Amino acid sequence: MTSSYTDQFIQHTGIALPIICGPMYPCSNPELVAAVSAAGGLGVVQPISLTYVHGYDFVKGLQYIRTLTRKPIGMNALIEQSNQRYHQRMVQWVELALQEGVRFFITSLGKPDWVVQRVHAAGGVVYHDVTETKWAQKAMDAGVDGLIAVNNRAGGHAGARSMQVLYDELQSCNLPLICAGGISTPEEYQQALRMGYAGIQMGTRFIATSECNAPMLYKQAIVNAKEIDIVLSERVSGTPVSLIRTPFIDRMGLKPTRFEQWMLHGQQRKYLMRTIYMLKSLWKLKQAVLDKTGSRDYWQAGKSVAGINSIDSVKDILPRFAKDSSILR
């Protein structure tokens, strides 16, 4: 049987399957978001990806997704507040998303209190990305409704703990916990639900789909990669980010230079260094996705590549998970 937390998560989202397509910069194109929601999961809009990479006005992008599916969608709010201009843009995006009917939000970084207050006032819910108890407590103090538990097999910003250790650490929070990291097969999904997770979040599995508009060489790299090919780079944002090891990544290096280390260890300097990292990485990742030749091999992926053996349609992938859900219900 699924847990009461799974039922609570499904009630929070209005979806049929407790599966989130994790918000991905730069891979969350509108067609992918819509396809996951249409198939019974939850597609989540990543606003920087929607506007900066895929070129949509934010509201028009949401409205375009609505022409593809009327099923629920979510939005990711990165709430880093060191850049005031970016913070104001995010405040505006949250407000516009609420006006367009979005009621499920995933917050990342920073303190989510202002998002929680605004979304709750509109009758919505907020889940927050966490990697350990310290961040979970801050999120709970802000009043979040659930937690995205990011483990050490995740793509993008990975945690330091295994799926099991992180669950054991967070289960006392008494909130729905979503397992994020290392899942790409129905068997791994089953394992997470049996462990007690309310649902799962997948990212890498959805990049290797026909609905994602990443370059074919990126998708094929995911299919070809083994778990050992996933490396952690500290030169994307200043904190570990999972990437497929490629010649470009080898040339770039995984560790900060001495100058970058000095910048990152200063209270004021670290914000400047992280901003520099972010701007450089946004550009490189954007170019990697828009370059259909695949020559810019700067590709994010998690260790779930181990279970991905083909490029499939979302319409074919999610029914496999739905079949296994019936075993647990």
Image (spheres, rainbow, N blue to C red):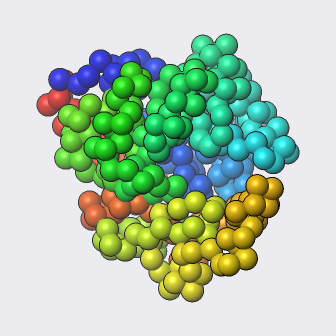
Q: Is 287 positioned to the left or the right of 200 in the image?
A: right
Instruction: Please tell me whether residue 108 is drawn above or below residue 262 in the rendered image.
Output: above
Q: Quadrant of residue 237?
A: bottom right
| Residue 81 position within the rendered picture, expressed as x and y whole percent measured from the top left | 76, 42
Q: Is residue 86 above or below residue 328?
A: below
Residue 205 visible in the current orientation: no
Q: Residue furthest right?
A: 85
Q: Is residue 247 left or right of residue 17?
A: right
Asked whether residue 8 appears in the rendered view, the answer is yes
Q: Name the residue: 70% across, 31% down.
A: 94
Q: Quadrant of residue 192?
A: top left
**Residue occupying the point 37% across, 50% down:** 161
What x and y, as percent, mark residue 233?
A: 53, 69
Query: Which residue is rendered at x = 19% and y = 47% of the image?
Result: 187
Camera-side residue: 254 or 9? 254
Instruction: In the displayed orientation, state which residue is furthest to the left.
Output: 327
Q: Nearer the viewer, residue 282 or 205?
A: 282
- Of the pair 302 and 223, the residue shown nearer to us: 302
Total numbered labels placed on residues in the image = 0
Above or below, 319 relative to 280: above
Name the residue: 17% across, 23% down.
1
- The quadrant of the image that shows the C terminus is top left
Coordinates of residue 78 in the picture (x, y in percent): 65, 43
Is 29 positioned to the left or the right of 259 in the image?
Answer: left
Point out residue 324 in the picture as x, y percentages from the top left corner.
Answer: 18, 37
